Image (spheres, rainbow, N blue to C red):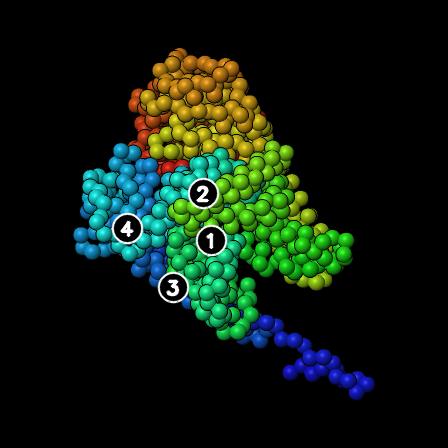
Amino acid sequence: MRIGRVGNGCSSKPKTPAVRRPLCWAGLIFFLCAVLFCCLYPAGGWLFPICLLLGISGLVCLAFGRTRPFAGFFLAAILMLCYCFLFGKLMADPALSLAGRTVLLTGDVAEAGPSSFLLNGKTQDGRRLKVQVWCGTDMAPDRFQRFSGSVQLSAVSSTDRFDSESYYRSRGVYLQGQLVSGDFETPEVYPIRTWPGRLNEFLCKKVRAVLPAQYSGLVCAVILGNRSYLPQEQYRLFERLGVGHLLAVSGMHLTLICGMFSLLAGRFVKRKSRRLLLSMGFVLFYMLLTGLGPSVSRAGIMLLLSYLAQLISRRADPPTSLGAAVFLMLFHNPFLAMNTGFQFSVCATVGVRILAGPLGEKLSSFGGKRIPPSFVKAFCVAFCGYVCTLPLTMIYDGRLVPMAIPANLLLSPLFVPVLAFCGGLALFSFVPLLGPVLAFCARLVIGAFLRLAGLLAQIGPEPVYYSGVAPVICAVILAAAITYGALKKDRRRFAAILCLAAMACGLSVSTQALAENRQAVLYTAAFDKRLVQTISYGGHAIVLGHLSSESQIEQVVLELKKEGVSVIDALILLPSGGRPRVSFSQLTESFSVKAVFLSPSDNLSTQAAESLAGIDRYDFSASVSFWQNGRIRLSPDGVVRIRVGAKKQKNLLILPADCAILDEENSRWDLVVTAWDTPPPVKASALLCARHFWGKENQNPNAYLLTYGRGVRCRIPLD
């Protein structure tokens, strides 16, 4: 036991014990274990060695007094890993056992898209399933209809660059399938579980009736969490400014809406405890109304805990509330740990609710009374929120948004009246006199908000794209340094940490620059059976693919921006099989395109032809050779042969979807990229085979299935 020093009749001041937050540690441990579980699932045999390693570490820590908290950490991790493993065995594995089978399903359509729908159904033997069913555009049903029919099932996989296996699993969807046959009918009586969704659709319909589409889509998105009607150009505007979080119903939205409800309830209910109970009920109702997304669920649980703390005369603690929310959400579904919306929501909350306050106090003490405290607080909220989400932005998007902090400082205060009028409109849109008045006011504030956002987008710089590991390392180091500076009081150590962080960032960036010097980056992706291939080198690139959909072109633009490309030397359009081309304006407006190569029998739409106007066009009706002494050769049927590299050149072969006959010239290829379901009759060291996600698995040991929308990247040295 430590005894204070006694001198001159006075004892030293006793040391204040550290505040314990067990729920924070539980949330952190569960999050780490859930991430590990998601990364390793469904690989078998991993649980026992990891638990053994953690158990040995825990026993070692128990042997020493000062390391016993670490022992608790390791032992808790074992329990949580076992729970995650049990969850996979009981929930995911029974569903995945049906993959590869055609089953009869009956159930309700939970969500409907242009060519797919989410089915909450059950099999003939009573097993309940959530299935993402793909169908033709003429077979797409309406939401909440009843379905009965046959579906060919497979394990869930990517649908495009936005959705992935982790996204579907985080929603409890482990299977997808192709619609074989079935019927849809509108039920006479809807189940109770569909009432929140039907109310959401009803309110969206009323809002769209009193507002134009350019305003009603934003109202439905920020109040009801329904982005189906949000114009694409508005979504891109928010993303370009780094304020996309305003579109996701989260803590700011929920706090304001619940505050409005509390003001209304306060006029009728005077007792505080009853008002708190009513507010808690409203929070639960609003969470159900908006679809229980990750951000609104996290914010709702934290707000419920805050109300509960007030009921029992306690002070709400943001770190404890956040840790409890993370623990409860991951306990319900550990696969939620890999959901990007959940990760962004948690990281932003750490910055806004935990780090912004201490950092603001330190900056206020530095500036004295010269800087208004309100400005310092707003700046710290925007800065800490952006810095804490920066590592995730670099991992998923590979970009920096220079306008993020100024745009949040200017747009966030204006967004509060937007939320207020949008919330009032969503609630009273069907009232004869009040609805049009609120619609007029909402139109004014939304119009002013969008005009200011458009002005900021015009005067501000474009997002800066990066690729590789170095930018991610720099973002993580910067976030860790800012966290240390916000939570610690020692200024000298903080200055030393910043110097070390700057040195580490510079070292990682320079190392990556040296490693990537004089390299060609090859990126390959497949959408359905349509290939996309980019070859970028020194700010230039060659793009070849079918490019018959907007998702393919968006993926190409993103990849080229990440590699710092400014000039496309050649745009090679593989035969589209009669499918009309979409507009290439995103490519031609973002990059300087020198030449376009296409088949003479290809089908260009009016929009595609207009977007390629003024660019040199060549038909490969005969064999064409170009790019550095004929390193690329085009055949009339669309076959592309490429030689990349210096001393040890790599020979690549690209086969389009409609190529059935191959006139092979080389005896062996280093890499063959094909849209065939089965390997082509060629000799190759490696095969990338694109196929439908419910297609037959490729059994060739050198073949790798190129899943839908998921790319493969490699780097090859040039001359």
Q: Position of residue 346 (x, y in %)?
A: 51, 55
Separation (CA) of disc 3 from disc 1: 24 Å
- Residue density around tag 4, few if under 14, some if 14–19, many if 20 or more, within 10 Å: many
Cβ atoms at labels 1 and 4 below 8 Å apart: no
Say which residue label 3 marks: 83
Q: Measure the C-alpha gap from mark 2 to mark 3.
A: 53 Å
The amino acid on which the numbered mark 3 sits, given as a three-letter code, is Tyr
State which quarter of the image contains the N terminus: bottom right
Tag 1: residue type?
Ser
- Which mark is first along the chain, 4 or 1? 4
Q: CA distance from mark 2 to mark 1?
A: 31 Å
Residue count near mark 2 (Cα–Cα under 10 Å), binned few <14, some 14–19, many ≥20? some
Location of mark 2 (residue): 436
| Residue holding disc 4 | 120
Identify the residue at image location x=74%, y=53%. Answer: 371
**Depicted 680 relative to depicted 442: above or below:** above
Q: Earlier in the sequence, mark 2 or mark 1?
A: 1
Residue 295 disc label: 1
Q: Residues within 10 Å of mark 3 (few under 14, many from 20)?
A: some
